[in-house]
Amino acid sequence: MDIIACPKCQNNAIVKSGIIKGRQRYLCKSCSYYFTVNKLGKKIDDYYVTKALQLYLEGLSYREIERIIGVSHVSISNWVKEFKLKKPPHPNYHPSYKIFKHAELLDYLKSKDQLSGAGMIITELGDKFMLIKWERFKD
């Protein structure tokens, strides 16, 4: 069992003091401060946070990232705000992305036509690979 300390005075002399909104309430015996333990939320693996932020910086929208990695667009928006990221302007380029299995990716990259005329990056997504390709807008 985790030892709970008072958030005000950091003393371990605490006792249970009822339940408020389904959460245990505690009383610190040394400073008479009432508090509840913070609710533990669902923790998303840092791997997905990093991938979501990389995709955001590559120019994908929150909803596109949501569809790719399966994390809520609201969570992604909160991470962008938390880390104070700004999307760089790409006025002449538009990213497109494709998801491949390993064999499909190798077949795609065999053609030289697929490799010329645009910048691209390949990133791992679990057991698949995502290829992001920037193509210049045609005037």
Image (spheres, rainbow, N blue to C red):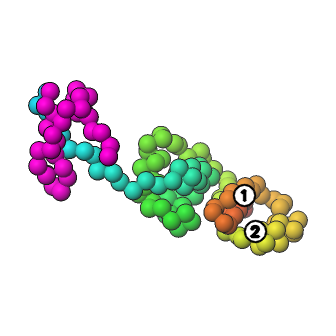
- Going from N to C along the chain, the mark reached first, 1 or 2, is 2
Q: Is residue 128 left or right of residue 68?
A: right
Q: Is residue 82 above or below residue 43?
A: above
Numbered range of the magenta stretch: 1-30
Quarter location, residue 6 = top left
What residue do we see at 27% from left, 39% from top?
4
Q: In x, y percent, where is residue 26?
A: 16, 42
- Viewer-side residue, 40 vs 79: 40
Query: Three-letter amino acid code at disc 1?
Result: Ile
Label disc, if present, on residue 58 of the rendered structure: none
Q: Residue at x 19, y 32 (%)?
A: 13
| Image height of 70 relative to 43, above or below | below
The residue indicated by pointer 1 is 122
Is the residue marked by circle 1 packed among few (<14), some (14-19), or many (20+) residues within 10 Å? some
> Does the magenta portion include 22?
yes
Residue 5, percent across and down? 26, 34
Image point 23% across, 28% down: which residue?
A: 11
Q: Is residue 92 above or below residue 64?
A: above
| Residue sitting nearer the eye, 120 or 134 | 120
Return the residue at label 2: 102
